[in-house]
Image (cartoon, rainbow, N blue to C red):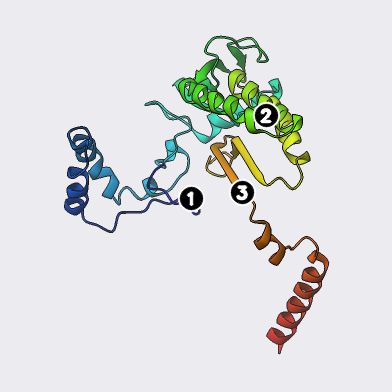
Amino acid sequence: MSNIKSFGATKFIPRSSPESFRKIVEASPRSSTALPLFDSLSPSLYSLSPAASLSIGFPADGHISSYYPGELKPTKEEIEKVQSICTEKGISTLNTRLTKNSDTSFTLLIASIAKSSTSGFPESPIKANGIEVEIKMGDYSDCLEKVNAALEEAKKYAGDSNRTAMLGDYQESFEKGSIEKHKEGSAKWVKDVGPVVENYIGFIEDYVDPSGSRAEWEGFVACVNKEQSKKVSFVESAVLCLDLLTIVWFLAVHCTRR
């Protein structure tokens, strides 16, 4: 959660003044903890400069990104070097962050519950392209442990063996940091046609990472409204809809030309 638009990846400024916002924080039950935090964050929350900091991008260029933590910010070229090594070694970077230790040393943080085991990953550190990349497990370990506990509870209500196995694949993925295991779970998710309750969870969309290599965490649960679905069932009428769109496009093009 941050003050960055989910579509457009640009910073937004609160409409209320800092003083008004502070009063809201002051009224909270935990104001003694929240107020000092707000006071420290308020200047950056309302800041409009430098211009580069108003959008998501490569931190070395002054932009914002949480995928590259630490004081030293890797350049676009350095990120591409590390990515090249990961691709060559068969390491998916969807569930990773990258820290720069020096001009020749980097650490790839793998999101996993396991903090020490690197089963399924190459021997670390990896030396190639004139740099050294250390693989470090256990990023967001505490959070993922809670996720897996919730998924274990969800298994009780899965309804069939395919969904139970799907949730199990997700758990193993989060335990070991294995994207391949998540893909196996995703394959089972695709086979679960027409569920009344649908869910998906994990490191999935890579739109926010400026390099397009790292995914943001997301999860959702959706419940089908069967009566409403009957009214807006596009699957059965897909061919008709496509025909109508073709007609609309034809008319728009020819009317514009006139």
Task: Give me the residue at 53% from left, 41% from top.
Answer: 210
Q: Amino acid at mark 3?
A: Cys
* Dot 3: element: strand
Distance between the Cα atoms at labels 2 and 1? Answer: 24 Å
Task: Give me the residue at 55% from left, 21% from top.
Answer: 112
Name the residue beneath numbered marker 3. Answer: 223
Where does the N terminus fall, quadrant-wise? top left
> Quick check: can you spot residue 102?
no
Using the image, tell me which numbered label, if any, was put on residue 121. none
How many numbered badges does the structure rendering display?
3
Using the image, tell me which numbered label, if any, was put on residue 182. 2
Q: Position of residue 196 (x, y in %)?
A: 68, 47
Q: Amino acid at mark 2?
A: His
* Dot 1: element: loop
Q: In the shown orientation, is residue 158 left or right of residue 192?
A: left
Up-down relation of residue 99 to residue 32 (above or below): above
Relative to the observer, which residue lies in front, 161 or 34? 161
Task: Give me the residue at 71% from left, 81% from top.
Answer: 252
The answer to whether mark 1 and mark 3 are in CB contact below 8 A is no
The answer to which of marks 2 and 1 sits earlier in the sequence is 1
Label 1 Cα neighbours within 10 Å, binned few <14 / some 14-19 / many ≥20: few
Distance between the Cα atoms at labels 2 and 3? Answer: 22 Å
Name the residue beneath numbered marker 1. Answer: 6
Up-down relation of residue 113 to residue 185 (above or below): above
Where does the C terminus fall, quadrant-wise? bottom right
Q: Position of residue 96 (x, y in %)?
A: 55, 27
Q: Position of residue 135 (x, y in %)?
A: 56, 16
> Quick check: can you spot residue 143?
yes
Q: Amino acid at mark 1?
A: Ser
Question: In the picture, residue 101 is in which quadrant?
Answer: top left
